[in-house]
């Protein structure tokens, strides 16, 4: 499709100029100036009263088709300075030199690579997305016609066979993926697929590729299709759930959020089924609010004994990641623009929803010596109640301290409620003394009688589950 622009001349007349995608705006200016006897060096082009760069090609200028450009005189002539041109061969070698904008491409090639270009059957110079093919075209093309007026420019010199001249040399085409690979991926067992996903990123993460997402979508559609249900799965066969059980809480470094929204009774029933025949962990309650104390160092030593297969990713893990990505993308795209009053109203609605859903919240206070104190509070209680709770376990209860969240470090005010501080349904708070010299790891933060009654991290989680199960049973009865 032919494109053109209209140049509004200083005398009020209009000149239509047909443009190509690789045509520079300087050529547009020179074409319009030559037809009406103007000096292009003393004029510039403007679009909506803004100067446009004459060195840009039309495809990269952002100008629409059939746009109107104003040609206006400049205060002084455009200065001409030498341009540093660097040419790179296909083997990676480079040569550079200074040339005036009036120099032809052939002169530059002869000066920098005169010996190499003699062996080329059809030399081609590539600059951005413009190709100058053959000696004849190089002799007619100058740096100025390419839009190179000042500064530096990088070009590539390659040799193309005559039958390949119709193909664009500077466009990368990715290798075609075979459809058979996706089918083989589906036929592999979950263990081998998890190993493939786990080793893709090298280290502690993984990368989601298009093939993975396509196979996940295809497998999800196959599971939900009626033909799969009619294929004859026996009624007594245990079918694997597409949504595996997740961790109940995200005990991150900042405020925690509930990851899985399900009925509490159903959740505890599944936990009881999984733990059938297994003795419950020992829980040492050391104070009010079902307080328990455990050490992160002991938990890390326990995690070191996990086998490598524990960290392998399964297809269900990738499905959950895909689901979360879809929810995040949908929330960002569909989110309306809100005023400050509407945002405050939405925040209050979210707080009321949390208050209606969660009757208590679990707080973990982490000390610099990696001991963690856990307690259960009500969402409407202020942070001052938490500070009083912590003070009862300190070795130096008279010292002033702060509770904060990370990242970033934010010291929490004592007069705000746990609901306002976004600590519902659970959160991890960090402890620090106001006096810095008391925060050394070698110092004792908690009383020795409590440290002697440590509970494992599994026992701390079990204490929360048991408390919630008891509360759910009482409320239902």
Image (cartoon, rainbow, N blue to C red):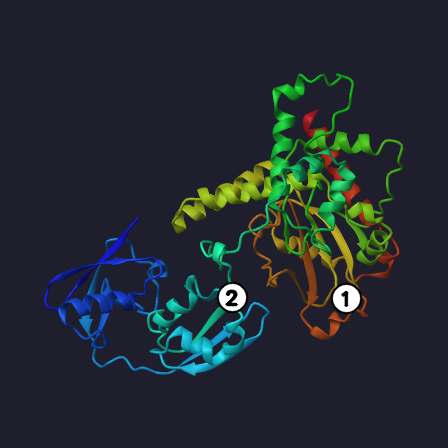
Residue 464, horizontal then vertical, whole percent: 75, 42
Q: Which mark is residue 87?
A: none
Q: Nearer the viewer, residue 421 or 197?
A: 197
Residue under numbered circle 2? 158
Q: Secondary structure at mark 1?
A: loop
Answer above or below: position of 325 versus 442: above
- Which callout, 1 or 2, points at the residue further toward the start of the chain? 2
Nearest the viewer among 434 and 61 is 61
Residue 259 visible in the snapshot: no
Which quarter of the rendered picture does the C terminus lie within? top right
Q: Quadrant of residue 98?
A: bottom left
Pointer 2: residues within 10 angstroms few (<14), some, or many (20+)? some
> Does residue 191 sit above or below 73 in this rendering?
above
How many numbered circles are shown?
Answer: 2
Query: Which residue is at a point 14% across and 68% down the rendered structure image?
Result: 36
Q: Nearer the viewer, residue 282 or 183?
A: 183
Q: Residue 125: where, in percent of width, then height?
A: 45, 67
Mark 1 Cα shell of 10 Å, populated few (<14), some (14-19), many (≥20): some
Residue at image position (36%, 81%) is: 100
Label 2 element class? strand
Left or right, residue 440 beside residue 141: right
Q: Which residue is mark 1?
A: 396
Q: Is residue 311 left or right of residue 94?
A: right
> Residue 149: which quarter of the image?
bottom left
On the image, the x and y values in percent for residue 141 come to 36, 70
> Alpha carbon of mark 1 to alpha carbon of mark 2: how far?
77 Å
Mark 1 or 2: in front is 2
Q: Nearer the viewer, residue 230 or 472?
A: 230
Q: Are marks 1 and 2 in contact (CB under 8 Å)?
A: no
């Amino acid at each position: 499709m032919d494109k053109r622009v209209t140049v509004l001349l200083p005398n009020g007349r209009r000149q239509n100029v047909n443009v190509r995608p690789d045509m520079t705006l300087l050529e547009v200016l020179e074409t319009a100036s030559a037809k009406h006897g103007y000096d292009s060096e003393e004029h510039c082009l403007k679009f909506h009263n803004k100067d446009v760069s004459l060195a840009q090609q039309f495809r990269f200028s952002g100008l629409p088709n059939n746009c109107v450009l104003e040609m206006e005189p400049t205060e002084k002539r455009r200065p001409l300075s030498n341009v540093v041109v660097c040419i790179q061969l296909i083997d990676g070698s480079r040569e550079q030199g200074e040339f005036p904008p009036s120099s032809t491409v052939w002169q530059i090639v002869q000066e920098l690579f005169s010996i190499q270009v003699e062996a080329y059957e059809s030399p081609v110079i590539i600059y951005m997305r413009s190709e100058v093919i053959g000696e004849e075209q190089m002799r007619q093309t100058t740096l100025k016609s390419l839009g190179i007026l000042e500064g530096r420019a990088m070009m590539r010199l390659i040799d193309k066979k005559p039958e390949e001249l119709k193909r664009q040399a500077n466009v990368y085409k990715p290798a075609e993926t075979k459809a058979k690979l996706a089918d083989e991926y589906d036929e592999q067992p979950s263990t081998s697929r998890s190993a493939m996903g786990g080793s893709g990123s090298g280290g502690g993460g993984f990368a989601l590729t298009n093939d993975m997402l396509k196979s996940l979508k295809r497998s999800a559609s196959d599971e939900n299709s009626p033909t799969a249900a009619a294929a004859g799965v026996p009624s007594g066969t245990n079918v694997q759930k597409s949504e595996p059980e997740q961790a109940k809480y995200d005990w991150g470094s900042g405020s925690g959020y509930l990851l899985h929204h399900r009925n509490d009774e159903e959740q505890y029933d599944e936990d009881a089924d999984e733990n059938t025949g297994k003795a419950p962990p020992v829980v040492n309650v050391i104070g009010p609010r079902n307080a328990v104390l455990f050490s992160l160092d002991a938990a890390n030593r326990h995690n070191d004994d996990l086998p490598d297969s524990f960290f392998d990713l399964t297809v269900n893990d990738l499905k959950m990641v895909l689901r979360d990505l879809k929810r995040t993308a949908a929330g960002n795209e569909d989110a309306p623009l809100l005023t400050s009053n509407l945002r405050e109203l939405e925040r209050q609605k979210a707080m009321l929803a949390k208050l209606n859903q969660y009757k208590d919240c679990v707080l973990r206070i982490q000390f610099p010596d990696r001991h963690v104190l856990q307690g259960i509070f009500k969402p409407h209680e202020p942070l001052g109640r938490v500070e009083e709770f912590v003070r009862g376990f300190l070795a130096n209860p008279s010292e002033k301290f702060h509770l904060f969240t990370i990242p970033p470090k934010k010291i929490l005010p004592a007069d705000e409620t746990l609901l306002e501080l976004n600590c519902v349904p659970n959160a991890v708070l960090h402890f620090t003394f106001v006096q810095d010299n008391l925060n050394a790891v070698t110092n004792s933060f908690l009383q020795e009688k409590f440290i002697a009654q440590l509970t494992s991290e599994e026992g701390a989680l079990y204490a929360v589950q048991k408390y919630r199960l008891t509360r759910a049973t009482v409320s239902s009865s």
